[in-house]
Image: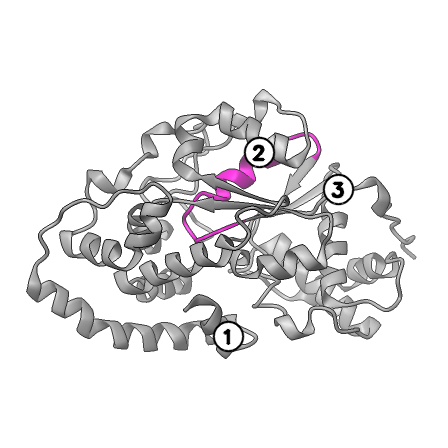
Amino acid sequence: MIEPIMIKQDNLEGPIFVVGNSRSGTTMMGNILRNHPMIFTLHHEIHFFEQLCESKNFSCYLSIDKAVNLMARLLCINHDSYWTQGDPSRFIQEAATVVGSMESKAVSPAGVFEQFLRYTAMKNGKTVPCDQTPRYVLYIDEILKLYPGSRVINMVRDPRAVLLSQKNKWKRRWMGYSNFPLKESIRTKINYHPITISMIWNASVRAVSRFADHPRVLLVKYEDIITNSESEVRKVCSFLGVQFHKEMLDIPQAGSSLTRFSSTGKGIDSSKAETWRKGGLNPTEIYICQKITGALMKLYGYQPIHVRTNPLMLIWYLLLFPLKSAMSLLLNLKRMKNIAEAIKRRL
């Protein structure tokens, strides 16, 4: 018989959520925060919002059995990763113990998720949990309401750099990332289209724009972090109300779509600034991206460049867009609890 695990909520702050458009530096920020002695950043994206629970059910009461099953799924994803998660029943006993430790017996999915975050941080010897799932940028309003002590760090990156990273993401399986499944490579390859990626960048930026002055939301530009690391990380620490530690900058140089995985490199790599200018995108891709994101990218200080697009290639991308969108939707159906809501939040 395992004794209930008592988590003292009044001694904890957070949780912290690192959000932003995919490929905008959320993993880097998560690694920086993980090096703080108080903060534990989960090693995998959890995808609770949208993929495990739809918004209308966040605060609904759960039976104990359903709460335990949800907790087991969260523990499973945290252990295996969202891509490679196995059978959650392996974690049922641990899940029952954690759910049994919750102060309120009227539990909700949002409450189970918070308990999971705090338990995982405590299990790893830390007091403040951090989830670095980029897609949560579309759920900032819900996060701020559900978790009054939470802090949100929103990462923003030049949309052209995001486009290049997304274009090459499918290759990661062959660049030393052995835990990147083949089906994920196929899905990522099909998901890529300059129109789609640019529209999603717009949606992510618009989603956070109304929280620009919110005291619990901080905007961090990827380019500022890699070119002026210590100053920017000090600002992040000030926002979180924690002390800066020099060791926070000593992060693994991994997670790029453009370079092979290395387990030895340490520190923030300033050479990744404006990688898109060094090649990898054709003029038509840059033109499409700037045409769609133009107004918002200027708002964040990203200046468009003059490019001469190929009319035939532009027509090709336009004709390909409906087919790619349909295929992408089919491949992502199982990743959304409510398809209509997911599409609405993006577009």
Query: Is disc 2 surrounded by few (<14), some (14 to 19) or many (20+) residues within 10 Å?
Result: many
Residue at mark 2: 236
Q: Verify CB contact (< 8 Å) between mark 1 and mark 3.
A: no
Q: Nearer the viewer, residue 164 or 235?
A: 235
* Residue appearing at x 51%, y 30% in the figure: 251
> Going from the N terminus, do you reach mark 1 or mark 2 first?
2
Q: Amino acid at mark 2?
A: Val
Left or right, 6 with reference to 188: right
> Going from the N terminus, do you reach mark 1 or mark 3 first?
3
Image location of residue 239, percent across then percent down = 62, 35
Numbered circle sitting on residue 334: 1
In what element is the residue under mark 3?
Answer: loop
> Going from the N terminus, do you reach mark 3 or mark 2 first?
3
Residue at mark 3: 13
Numbered circle sitting on residue 154: none
In what element is the residue under mark 1?
Answer: helix
Left or right, 247 with reference to 38: left
Image location of residue 159, percent across then percent down = 33, 50
Q: Amino acid at mark 3?
A: Glu
